[in-house]
Amino acid sequence: MDSEVYRKKLELDILAIIEEKLRNGQMDAERARAIARMVLDKLHPPLTLEQIHQIAPTLDDHFAELARAVLPIIQDHEEEVRKIISEHAQKLINLGKINEATQVLKQATKPK
Protein backbone atom coordinates (compact mmCIF):
# COMPACT_ATOMS: atom_id res chain seq x y z
CA MET A 1 0.00 0.00 0.00
CA ASP A 2 1.20 3.51 -0.76
CA SER A 3 2.47 5.23 2.39
CA GLU A 4 0.31 8.31 1.87
CA VAL A 5 -2.83 6.19 1.49
CA TYR A 6 -1.84 4.24 4.60
CA ARG A 7 -1.25 7.46 6.57
CA LYS A 8 -4.59 8.93 5.48
CA LYS A 9 -6.40 5.71 6.42
CA LEU A 10 -4.88 5.87 9.90
CA GLU A 11 -5.92 9.50 10.25
CA LEU A 12 -9.47 8.68 9.13
CA ASP A 13 -9.66 5.78 11.59
CA ILE A 14 -8.55 8.08 14.40
CA LEU A 15 -11.03 10.74 13.29
CA ALA A 16 -13.83 8.15 13.37
CA ILE A 17 -12.87 7.22 16.93
CA ILE A 18 -12.85 10.88 18.00
CA GLU A 19 -16.25 11.51 16.38
CA GLU A 20 -17.75 8.41 17.98
CA LYS A 21 -16.40 9.28 21.44
CA LEU A 22 -17.59 12.89 21.16
CA ARG A 23 -21.08 11.82 20.06
CA ASN A 24 -21.34 9.29 22.90
CA GLY A 25 -20.10 11.77 25.47
CA GLN A 26 -17.05 9.60 26.19
CA MET A 27 -14.64 12.39 25.25
CA ASP A 28 -14.63 16.13 25.72
CA ALA A 29 -13.58 18.70 23.12
CA GLU A 30 -10.30 19.42 24.90
CA ARG A 31 -9.18 15.79 24.70
CA ALA A 32 -10.27 15.62 21.04
CA ARG A 33 -8.14 18.70 20.29
CA ALA A 34 -5.16 17.17 22.12
CA ILE A 35 -5.47 13.97 20.09
CA ALA A 36 -5.83 15.91 16.83
CA ARG A 37 -2.79 18.04 17.68
CA MET A 38 -0.70 14.95 18.46
CA VAL A 39 -1.80 13.22 15.25
CA LEU A 40 -0.95 16.28 13.18
CA ASP A 41 2.46 16.56 14.85
CA LYS A 42 3.37 12.90 14.43
CA LEU A 43 1.71 11.96 11.13
CA HIS A 44 2.80 14.90 9.01
CA PRO A 45 3.47 14.02 5.37
CA PRO A 46 5.59 12.82 3.75
CA LEU A 47 6.18 9.63 5.72
CA THR A 48 7.50 6.29 4.60
CA LEU A 49 5.73 3.06 5.53
CA GLU A 50 8.57 2.31 7.94
CA GLN A 51 8.12 5.68 9.64
CA ILE A 52 4.39 5.04 9.97
CA HIS A 53 5.11 1.62 11.47
CA GLN A 54 7.45 3.26 13.99
CA ILE A 55 5.05 6.08 14.89
CA ALA A 56 1.79 4.12 15.05
CA PRO A 57 2.56 2.16 18.25
CA THR A 58 3.25 5.43 20.07
CA LEU A 59 -0.10 7.01 19.23
CA ASP A 60 -2.00 5.16 21.94
CA ASP A 61 0.64 5.68 24.64
CA HIS A 62 -1.17 8.74 26.01
CA PHE A 63 -4.51 8.19 24.32
CA ALA A 64 -5.62 4.62 24.97
CA GLU A 65 -8.78 5.09 22.92
CA LEU A 66 -6.64 5.10 19.77
CA ALA A 67 -5.62 1.47 20.24
CA ARG A 68 -8.44 0.41 17.93
CA ALA A 69 -6.83 2.37 15.07
CA VAL A 70 -3.25 1.46 15.95
CA LEU A 71 -3.61 -2.28 16.49
CA PRO A 72 -4.35 -3.19 12.84
CA ILE A 73 -1.23 -1.32 11.72
CA ILE A 74 0.92 -3.12 14.26
CA GLN A 75 -0.57 -6.46 13.26
CA ASP A 76 -0.06 -5.75 9.53
CA HIS A 77 3.56 -4.83 10.14
CA GLU A 78 4.22 -7.90 12.28
CA GLU A 79 2.67 -10.13 9.62
CA GLU A 80 4.79 -8.49 6.92
CA VAL A 81 7.96 -9.04 8.97
CA ARG A 82 7.00 -12.68 9.66
CA LYS A 83 6.48 -13.24 5.95
CA ILE A 84 9.87 -11.76 5.04
CA ILE A 85 11.67 -13.80 7.72
CA SER A 86 9.88 -16.96 6.66
CA GLU A 87 10.76 -16.43 3.00
CA HIS A 88 14.40 -15.74 3.90
CA ALA A 89 14.60 -18.86 6.06
CA GLN A 90 13.00 -20.93 3.29
CA LYS A 91 15.58 -19.69 0.78
CA LEU A 92 18.39 -20.62 3.16
CA ILE A 93 16.87 -24.09 3.64
CA ASN A 94 16.59 -24.53 -0.13
CA LEU A 95 20.28 -23.66 -0.41
CA GLY A 96 21.08 -26.29 2.21
CA LYS A 97 22.00 -23.71 4.84
CA ILE A 98 19.95 -25.26 7.63
CA ASN A 99 22.08 -23.84 10.46
CA GLU A 100 21.82 -20.31 9.07
CA ALA A 101 18.06 -20.69 8.65
CA THR A 102 17.79 -21.91 12.25
CA GLN A 103 19.78 -18.89 13.44
CA VAL A 104 17.56 -16.49 11.47
CA LEU A 105 14.43 -18.03 12.98
CA LYS A 106 15.87 -18.07 16.50
CA GLN A 107 16.91 -14.43 16.22
CA ALA A 108 13.47 -13.45 14.89
CA THR A 109 11.64 -15.16 17.74
CA LYS A 110 13.94 -13.92 20.50
CA PRO A 111 12.06 -11.64 22.93
CA LYS A 112 13.09 -8.02 22.68
Image: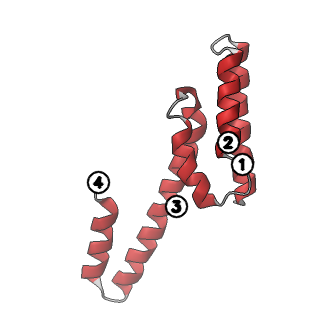
Indicate the quadrant containing the C terminus: top left, top right, bottom left or bottom right. bottom left
The answer to whether residue 83 is left or right of residue 15 is left
- Classify mark 1: helix, strand or loop: loop
Residue mark closest to the camera, 3 vs 2 = 2
Give, as a three-letter code, the residue at label 3: Glu
Whole-Å distance between the Cαs marked 2 and 4? 31 Å
Q: Distance between the residues labelled 3 and 4?
A: 18 Å
Q: Residue 41 carries which label?
A: 2
Residue contact between numbered discs 2 and 1, judged by CB atoms under 8 Å = yes
Mark closer to the chain start, 3 or 4: 3
* Rendered residue at 36%/89% (across/down): 95
What's the distance in space between the residues labelled 2 and 1, CA to CA? 6 Å
Residue type at mark 4 is Pro
Asked which secondary structure carries label 4, the reply is loop
Comes first in the chain, label 1 or label 3: 1
Q: Distance between the residues labelled 1 and 3?
A: 24 Å
Q: Are marks 4 and 1 in contact (CB under 8 Å)?
A: no
The residue tagged 1 is 44
| Residue 59 in the image, given as x and y percentages of width and height | 56, 38
Q: Which amino acid does label 2 sit on?
A: Asp
Q: Could you say where residue 105 lies in the image, as x and y percent from the top left?
A: 32, 68
**Residue 111, numbered label:** 4
Whether the residues at callouts 3 and 2 have beta carbons within 8 Å, the answer is no
Characterize the local packing of mark 4: few (<14), some (14-19) or many (20 or more) Cα atoms within 10 angstroms.
Answer: few
Examine the rendered structure and indicate whether residue 42 appears above or below residue 1: above
The residue indicated by pointer 3 is 80
Residue 20 tag number: none
